[in-house]
Image (cartoon, helix red, strand yellow):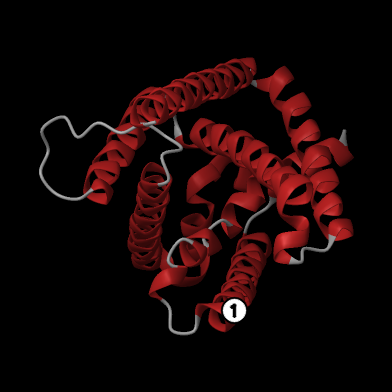
Amino acid sequence: MFASGFLAGVALAILAYKGFTTITNSGSELIDPHRNVGRAIIISLVICFVVYLLVAIAVGSNLTVPEIVKAKNYSLAEAARPALGEYGMWFTIAIAIIATASGLIASIFAVSRMLAMLTNMEIIPHRHFGMPGTIQNHTLVYTVVLAAVLAAFFDLSRIASLGAILYLVMDIAVQWGVFRYLRDDIGANGAIVIGAIVADVVVLGAFIVLKASADPLIIVVAVGAIALIFALERLFLQRSRQHDHVTKSHSA
């Protein structure tokens, strides 16, 4: 039980490191991206590790495990109360709100940029619904609306759980695609890619087992969302191929 719980915790902790995707999705805006993207990713991972390690030490040294469980999302603020008092707690909450808002804005920008790129590659469909602006402006609106819907129907812990499942599944799919189709083109190390897939599968499996007993609705929603995405994407690609085939036939 301890091992599965620890691995499930790792699944949620992975979300703490997803911020480096903001860097990869903005690679074209960096100077000398072939050199600086890798450096930026490593630096961001190190900073993230240090910050979360300090937060864990601060919380763990001021609160007991039952107090951390009771405080949940406010554990850092509760940990600041004994040392800094009531004002320190509210100051910590304010800093956490600012950090969360900035991280949310950065993630929304990264996702909207990625969706715009996929739209331009004709991998996903797009409708502007009469909105002005570029494709990325439209995908930004869609991302915000979807985030608002999730916030309306799920609490923070459920959103994080759902995000962990979808993110790990996406990681596995991308890593398999790299290993199967792009390994030679980009010079990827096959052993590292397979190792990442195995690690993702182990963590995802433990997380699903734990959530299936504690909150099975999340598993149902995640499976339904994945199935719907795959089905719609397959339908879109089939129609795109048929349209391209008809267009080529008419031009010939």
Quarter-of-image position of residue 138: top left
**Does residue 4 lie above or below 108 as drawn?**
above
**Does residue 199 lie above or below 218 as drawn?**
below
Comparing 224 with 14, the one in front is 224
Classify the position of the N terminus by image quarter. top right
Residue drawn at x 78%, y 50% is 179
Residue at label 1?
A: 43
Residue drawn at x 24%, y 41% is 141
Classify the position of the C terminus by image quarter. top left
- Where residue 167 appears, as percent x and y from the top left, is 60, 41
Mark 1: secondary structure: helix
- Where residue 60 appears, as percent x and y from the top left, is 67, 60
Query: Residue type at mark 1?
Result: Ile
Residue drawn at x 65%, y 51% is 13
Residue drawn at x 84%, y 39% is 202
Q: Is residue 173 left or right of residue 89?
A: right
Crowd tier of the residue under label 1, counting other residues whose Cα lies within 10 Å: few below 14, some 14–19, many 20 or above: few
